[in-house]
Image (spheres, coloured by chain):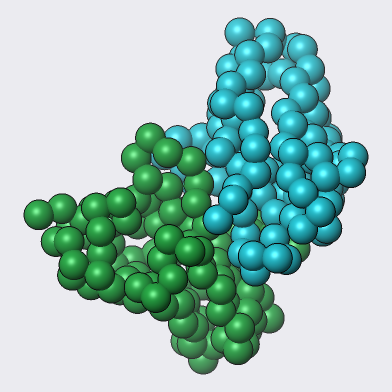
């Protein structure tokens, strides 16, 4: 069965960096685009970034452009999100999601808290 | 990035029908259609339909999506207590090269 497991969340000070990782299994990872989506406390879902199946195309929300970088390793079935220059408004649960027509399978999420 | 518009809340009685709407534009909903997700807090979102009315396996036929022009809709028939959740529409926006989400509609089943 499809499984997506995020890791790397935690508490980090403003301005610092954090790297999230998502390990995928149960499907042909190299065939699927992958997304990161977040939900801040008390807020709705916010799309963060996406990568095409082969990593040749990457897309970002304006709110993270220039600070976050999405990458994938199709040999290891992982997709990462490098987050630099973190701000308090980046505090959220971060989900990775597979895309098959739409983000169809989601991980359980990992909590990132940006606080001094 | 401009998101999609959703009413913040809808309340309906047990067994009734709820219709949730999601107006977009020709670059997102009107282009490739919308996806609908159900989100119970503390759990990952669940995809209910995509590209207007393609239902993933295992999703009840009580959930039906459609599109009219640039507006997507999700109809839930025979409301059950477990349908109480947040519902999000989402679409790829070709002009922004970004996925956009609606703000979500909180469905309350009375």
Q: In cyan, which chain?
A: B
Is residue B27 visible in this depiction of the protein? Answer: yes
Question: Residue B76: where, in percent of width, then height?
Answer: 77, 26
Question: Residue A17: where, in percent of width, then height?
Answer: 23, 72
Residue B65, placed above or below residue A32 = above
Question: Residue A35: where, in percent of width, then height?
Answer: 55, 66
Q: Colour of chain A?
A: green
For the residue pair B85 and A87, the one nearer the viewer reads as A87
Residue B59, placed above or below residue A27 = above
Residue A35, placed above or below residue B85 = below
Q: Is residue B37 left or right of residue B51?
A: left
Name which residue lies at 60% across and 48% down: B3
Quadrant location of the N terminus of chain A in the rendered image? bottom right
Q: Residue furthest left?
A: A116
Is residue A29 visible in this depiction of the protein? Answer: no
Q: Residue furthest right?
A: B68
Q: Is residue A2 left or right of residue A39?
A: right
Name which residue lies at 70% across and 65% down: B95
Q: Is residue B80 left or right of residue A12?
A: right
The quadrant where residue B68 appears = top right
Question: Residue A37: where, in percent of width, then height?
Answer: 49, 57
Residue B56, placed above or below residue A60 = above
């Amino acid at each position: 069965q499809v499984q997506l497991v995020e890791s790397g969340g935690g508490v980090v000070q403003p301005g610092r960096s954090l790297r999230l990782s998502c390990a995928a299994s149960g499907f042909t990872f190299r065939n699927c685009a992958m997304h990161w989506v977040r939900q801040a406390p008390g807020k709705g879902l916010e799309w963060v970034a996406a990568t095409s199946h082969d990593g040749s195309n990457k897309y970002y929300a304006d709110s993270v452009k220039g600070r976050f970088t999405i990458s994938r390793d199709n040999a290891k079935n992982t997709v990462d999100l490098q987050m630099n220059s973190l701000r308090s408004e980046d505090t959220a649960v971060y989900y990775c999601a597979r895309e098959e027509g739409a983000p169809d399978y989601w991980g359980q999420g990992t909590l990132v808290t940006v606080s001094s | 990035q401009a998101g999609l518009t959703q009413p913040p809340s809808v309340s309906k009685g047990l067994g009734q029908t709820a219709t949730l709407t999601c107006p977009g534009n020709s670059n997102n909903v009107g282009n490739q259609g919308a996806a609908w997700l159900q989100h119970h807090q503390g759990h990952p979102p669940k995809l209910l339909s995509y590209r207007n009315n393609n239902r993933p396996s295992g999703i009840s036929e009580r959930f039906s999506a459609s599109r009219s022009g640039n507006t997507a809709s999700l109809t839930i028939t025979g409301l059950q207590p477990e349908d109480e959740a947040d519902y999000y529409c989402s679409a790829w926006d070709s002009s922004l090269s970004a996925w956009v989400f609606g703000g979500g509609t909180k469905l309350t089943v009375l």
